[in-house]
Image (tube, helix red, strand yellow):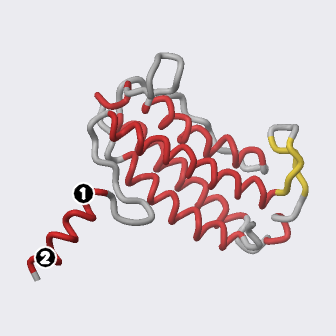
Amino acid sequence: MYTTINGFLNDWKQEAALTLQVLDKLTDTSLSQAVSNEQLRTIGEIAWHIVQSVPFFVNQIGLQQEVPAPQEGSASAIAQAYRRASEAVVAELSAHWADQDDKLPQPIKLFGVIDTTVAGVLNTLVRHQIHHRAQLTILMRQAGLVAPGIYGPNEEETAAMKAAQAKS
């Protein structure tokens, strides 16, 4: 759980950069890839959900961020919208909350029903993003894309490292 705004911001910046690595690898044709049937979310739907959840969560704690509307068929629009949403959170928290760590333990009802704290909402935002980012990496493989290594090297990066070691 976060005890300082800067602690959240440091974590957020790291996780947002990792999410952007994934979003930047999406292609327009990959956006329609789903797990197995039409009732499950596609890459495009999950990616837009990640984008929209950023302002949606922070609006729960009193920030006023616009929730962008999904744009059909554009992977670059998704990445750009996420970049803007993430930067807006960093800018607003840095400008208005950086020295107000006393806000974090304040009780709040997330979505009007879940008892938590402001820190709990921020924690849930980060974990929610990680969860859906993982879904995207699996669907990216199904769509024929190479998903970037997130917390360690992916299959291709591992093979390249082993090949480099074998040459030395």
Image quadrant holding the N terminus, namely: bottom right
- At a point 66% along the width and 66% down the height, the residue shown is 8
Q: Position of residue 74 (x, y in %)?
A: 35, 31
* In the image: residue 9, left or right of residue 20: right
Q: CA distance from mark 1 to mark 2?
A: 15 Å
Residue denoted by label 2: 166
Residue at figure coordinates x 63%, y 48% from the top left: 128
Q: Nearer the viewer, residue 34 or 76?
A: 34
Name the residue furthest top. 38
Residue 83 appears left or right of 125? left
Sequence-wise first label, 1 or 2? 1
**Residue under numbered circle 1:** 156
User: Mark 1, residues whose alpha carbon is within 10 Å: few (<14), some, or many (≥20)?
Assistant: few
Closer to the camera: disc 1 or disc 2?
2
Q: Quadrant of residue 168?
A: bottom left
**Amino acid found under the numbered disc labelled 2:** Ala
User: Where 157 falls versus 88 (above or below)?
Assistant: below
